[in-house]
Amino acid sequence: MTTQTVLAAAGSVPGGEAVTFWILAPLALIGAIGMVAARNAVHSALMLVMTMLCLGVFYVIQAGPFIGVVQIIVYTGAIMMLFLFVLMLVGRGASDSVIETLRGQRVAALVLGVGFAGLVGTGLHRALADSTAVGLTAANAEGNVQGIARLLFTKYVLAFELTSALLITAAVGAMVLAHIERRREDRMDQAATMKARFRPGNYPGPKPGPGVFATSSSVATPARLPDGRLAEQSTPEILPVRELTAEDTTLKGTEK
Amino acid sequence: MTFLAQEPTLADFGRDPWWLVLIKIVFAFAFGLLATLLGVWFERRVVGRMAVRPGPNQLGPFGLLQTLADGMKMAFKEDILPRSADKVVYFFAPVISVVCAVTALSVMPFGPMVSIFGHQTPLQVTDVSVAVLLVLACSSMAVYGVVLAGWASGSTYPLLGGLRSSAQLISYEIALGLSIVAVFMLSGTMSTSGIVAAQGERPQLEFFGFDVSAPGWYAILLFPSFVIFFIAIVGETNRAPFDLPEAESELVAGFMTEYSSLKFALIMLSEYVAMVTMSAFTVTLFLGGWRAPWPITAFWDGANSGWWPMLWFFGKVLLLVFVFVWLRGTLPRLRYDQFMRLGWKVLLPLNLVWILVLAGWLKTQGWEQADRLILYGAVAGVVLILTLLWPSRSPAPKPTLAEEINNRPPGSFPLPPLDLQVPLSPRTQRIVAEREPANLADTDSREV
């Protein structure tokens, strides 16, 4: 890594770095465009993964191995994996709808996007084209990892702690919003369940099955008690109880 | 200490001619493939021995060629592509798994500096200042192989396996990463060769006034980290008892249900290569890398020089692979929620507490004796007071059976009296009396 540091500081681009860049930069672009263009949500996520991997390699070849590998571990390995997890739960057939909810939104978005990209690109180019990078050797003097650690835990320690507090708050908030916890007292253990089952007024045995008669094969047909009354417990609660009409009970003409 | 001169440092890497790099890469790759071939055989033989049966023993000496035959058979099987599969992703998923598993082998130090055709070179493909993180990155990318294989198959069981796998691997990656933090703290480096070098030193710890020459292996110095790390890598490699993504009793074969032929062979290859890679990783981080274990170094000074260290390295890897197989032969599979609870509620907090303790210990090494004792006493006191004052929820006293019966609401089910004695029927006694006595004469001679 030391040779790379020296070369990068001198402002020249070594051959290996140039070759890597010209192979991976088109891949990163293809990934970025494909992520927007892909119909399938999982394909979009995979395209983004490809772009992120390319970015990680770019960091590594620009003498920042730590940030490059962390990019791969954290963004590609953990965050995109969580995205995939959610997308897989949504279902593999899920894809974007092509109906425009606002008239002309796609054209407007395209124009604005290209305009913004042009602004940022020309701005960066005009600002950085003539300047030479300095200070990389000094920053990586005692090793890339050690240099980042020194900055992170001395100069930027407050920002670091605040960011972590923010992230923890977000995680706890998401858990509080999404998690339904029943209190320990509300949980029914086995003894309580059995007591509720044998409570007066509750019939502890299995419920009677539906009455399936010769005229009907429907589970909505209630069974009859010995005295001729209908047994209400024999039909599921969600099914409406209905009287069969004469048309329902006539023969369907399927006997021959 | 003659061998210290042969410790490779980061500056020794990146100086090899291209043919030497090629030889090293091919060697590492061949090591992965060969380890799979032998690993499958080894696992089947060992599990067979544990189940009191011979295992594969027909093809070749000791059945060594069994895996080769299985591989040939697999290559000639029909490659089935499910109609609902996502074709591109379905094809790439096993490739991702294999590439990630093999790439991680490139930073494993197989040995110290040796001479190959006149070149002094370390027995390691390459090393970077973040080599350990590179292995972590490879293992976190390998998850994509499993998850995408499950998703792209386009059927339910593989999808469930893939979902399980993604949640499982993210959870255990955290425990894995945190357990390595302790290694970084002691060794002060993230390069694998640096960590092996750091384990060669015997640190002089001052332990309550006594100078103790501690052993160098981090498995002993950082025992909690080692245990957590090993549990986490078993989860990370999808091996029993954590093989939930491919639980055959629940999900057919999990994420690889739809795979066949060479694609299935690739998945199997990646699993075994990952097992070997992770074993090598454990050896590097915690078991002294290629260093000879203690009794050998005691009477043989040259054990850590030349090509010998490769032998110790392979021996240690084999030992860990045996532990993997042993676990599989011994432990039943965990339920999914138990598995998650172990990861998040046991391994993670334990890890954090251990890192805190270790950091405190390291920070106070340079202090005055009295200051240190005061600090340790204060911390121990706070912990003790917290434990004593921790609010405990005492359960309400349970009512006795008689009270419960008396408190039953009116109209409850009738109960028999508690002191009811059911008298024996007189007929029962008569049947017992009239029964012929059992023929007990030849009980001993019969097989039970």
Image (cartoon, rainbow, N blue to C red):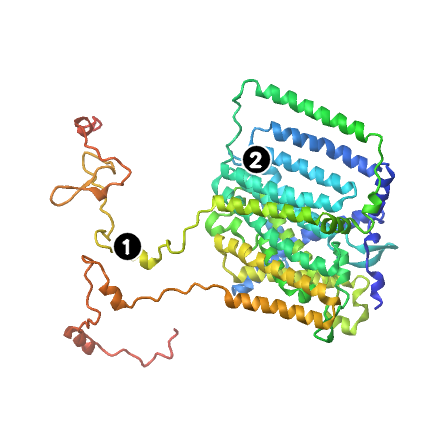
Q: Which of marks 1 and 2 is in front?
A: 1
Q: Where is residue A30 in the image (x, y as percent from the top left)?
A: 68, 30
**Does residue B40 appear in the picture of this structure?**
no
Q: In this view, does B3 lie to the left or right of B212?
A: right
Give the mark nearer the N terminus: 1 vs 2. Answer: 2
On-image quarter of the C terminus of chain B: bottom left
Q: Which amino acid does label 1 sit on?
A: Ala
Residue A32 image label: none
Q: Identify the element where label 1 is drawn.
A: helix
**Does residue B112 appear in the picture of this structure?**
yes
Q: Where is residue B246 in the image (x, y as percent from the top left)?
A: 52, 49
On-image quarter of the N terminus of chain B: bottom right
Residue at the image point whose x is 85% and y is 35% from the top: A132
Q: Position of residue B229 (x, y in %)?
A: 63, 58
Of the pair A85 and B141, the residue shown nearer to us: A85
Q: In this view, does B364 lie to the left or right of B89?
A: right
In the image, farthest residue toward the bottom? B441
Chain letter of disc 2? Answer: A
Up the image or down, A119 lies above or below B38; here it is: above
Of the pair B266 and A22, the residue shown nearer to us: A22
Up the image or down, B138 lies above or below A133; here it is: below
Q: In which quarter of the image is residue A3?
A: top right
Reading the image, the residue beneath label 2 is: A42
Q: How crowded is mark 2: few (under 14 residues within 10 Å), some or many (20 or more)?
A: many
Q: What residue type is labelled 2?
A: Val
Q: In this view, does A79 lie to the left or right of A149?
A: left
Q: Do the residues labelled 1 and 2 touch (CB within 8 Å)?
A: no
Chain letter of disc 1? Answer: A
Up the image or down, B342 lies above or below B443; here it is: above
Q: How crowded is mark 1: few (under 14 residues within 10 Å), some or many (20 or more)?
A: some
Reading the image, the residue beneath label 1 is: A196
Q: Position of residue A46 (x, y in %)?
A: 61, 36
